[in-house]
Image (tube, rainbow, N blue to C red):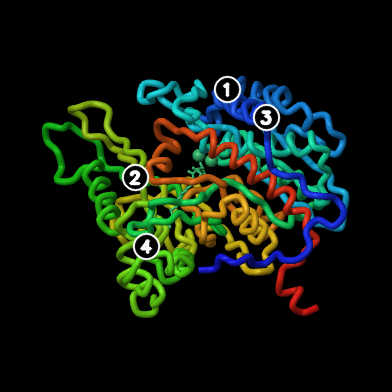
Amino acid sequence: TVSRPMGLRGKQQQGTSRIPSQFHKEERVAMKEALKGAIQIPTVSFSPKESNTTALAEFGEYIRKVFPTVFSTSCVQHEVVGEYSHLFTVQGLDPSLQPYMLLAHFDVVPASEEDWEVPPFSGLERDGFIYGRGTLDNKNSVMAILQALELLLIRNYIPRRSFFIALGHDEEVSGMNGAQKISALLQARGIQLAFLVDEGSFIVDGFIPSLKKPFAMISVSEKGAINLMLQVNMTPGHSSAPPKETSIGILAAAVSRLEQAPMPNMFGSGSLKTTLQHLANEFPFPTNLILSNLWLFQPLVSRMMERNYVTNAMVRTTIALTMFNAGVKVNVIPSTAQATMNIRIHPAQTVQEVLELVKNIVADDRVQFHVLSAFDSLPVSPSDDQALGYQLLHQTIRSVFPEVSVVTPGICIGNTDSRHFTNLTTGIYRFNPLYLQPQDFSSVHGINEKISVQAYETQVKFIFELIQNADTYQRPVSDLHEL
Ligand SMILES: CCCCCCCCCCCCCCCC(=O)N[C@@H](Cc1ccccc1)C(=O)O
Ligand SMILES: [Zn+2]
Ligand SMILES: [Zn+2]
């Protein structure tokens, strides 16, 4: 367990003085009201071709209204990209410092009114929590980033290091029109980023049984994915004289075989192993010893990880059957049956390897494979002493969340807009400065998504600190050792 400061040491902020992250009562009320207003705009992405464009446009008007200083300060340039996404360029004083990017998205997944305790687009405050779709994924980040910049600018802050704020409008349906276009635009301008911070991981609490303390997980990679459609075609006919096998039966047996035969456990070659080694001393006896001696206990630990759906997703490629279609009439045997699945690829495997494994499990030539889309897992970003982005996050976590004793690299089991930026940087970090418990995780894309007012204020504070920390001239520690 490393809890001492790593990486960035030495003098802070030569010249200008640091602006304390203290906000008065009126500012704190204004910031939570601004978030509520953002939740009330139903910026829903239904599919790559269908979104609430009226709401997306309204959101653009809304941020102009609630963050007037951001939009009127001369060191901040604003552009709309891909019709609804936003790119802010904040010009720093020192062009020799490589710029970085803060990334977030303001589209949300749909929410069915009836299931919620509080209407999902009401932004209602109840018992210290703000409820609504997007309070964790990901309007909290969108608003907190702009809010932190607004408050810094009001205090006459001018950054030393330039940075970009990119706010996507279609992350929930692939990010092709938002994040992808922003990335292409910056590439055309010859920009390279020192690092990028996006959503995708949290200060996680209660996901590993017997680990009582929360820890900060910064995701340094994310899983790949395949959308795969299996199809069986057989001769159609009259249901009164059925053949021995039908398209439905053949396909059902094939997908059942896939559910019965999970993909191999890759714990040994994955980053969850590193994560657990960082955490070893946080566990009570004997788990601390077990995790410190993975050379011996790896088989035991890898099986333990399979027991929970989230940690299971971190040790293997998963297959979720998500669509199943066949038949139109009760007395007609259909010719075609289709099953679509969403596969999430462990970083130790490739698209091709997984497709081979799936074919071998299905093992039936009558089942056709149609790959609808596929991409490999993302490259692993550095998390060593020299990794500026990782070390800045680590430093900021230590100061804003002093009670969190472990910060570790991890892997994101979902996909984020950050995957469109591999052309601009190798330092992609997915971290949302919020506590997340399993019940909060279920509310993301689920029901009763909510954020506490206090947690949101802390998120603003975190970004306020992170932006100032990024102004460091400090080179990573090991460079200093050489001096
Ligand atoms: C060691 C135990 C730690 C447990 C940590 C649990 C934290 C889990 C956090 C997971 C957050 C995932 C965020 C992913 C965002 C998301 O939902 N992305 C979506 C976006 C998407 C949609 C269409 C096509 C491509 C991508 C997705 O992955 O489906
Ligand atoms: Zn998201
Ligand atoms: Zn999402």
Q: Earlier in the sequence, mark 3 or mark 4?
A: 3
x%, y% of residue 100?
Answer: 73, 51
x%, y% of residue 105?
Answer: 60, 37
Q: Amino acid at mark 2?
A: Leu
Q: Amino acid at mark 3?
A: Glu
Mark 4 element type:
helix
Where is mark 2, residue-wise? 321
Q: Earlier in the sequence, mark 3 or mark 2?
A: 3
Where is mark 4, residue-wise? 357
Where is mark 3, residue-wise? 27
Asked whether residue 330 appears in the rendered view, the answer is yes
Question: How many numbered discs?
Answer: 4
Q: Earlier in the sequence, mark 3 or mark 1?
A: 3
Mark 1 element type:
loop
Q: Quadrant of residue 164?
A: top right
Mark 2 element type:
strand
Graded by Cα atoms within 10 Å as few (under 14), some (14 to 19) or many (20 or more), the crowding at tag 1 reads many
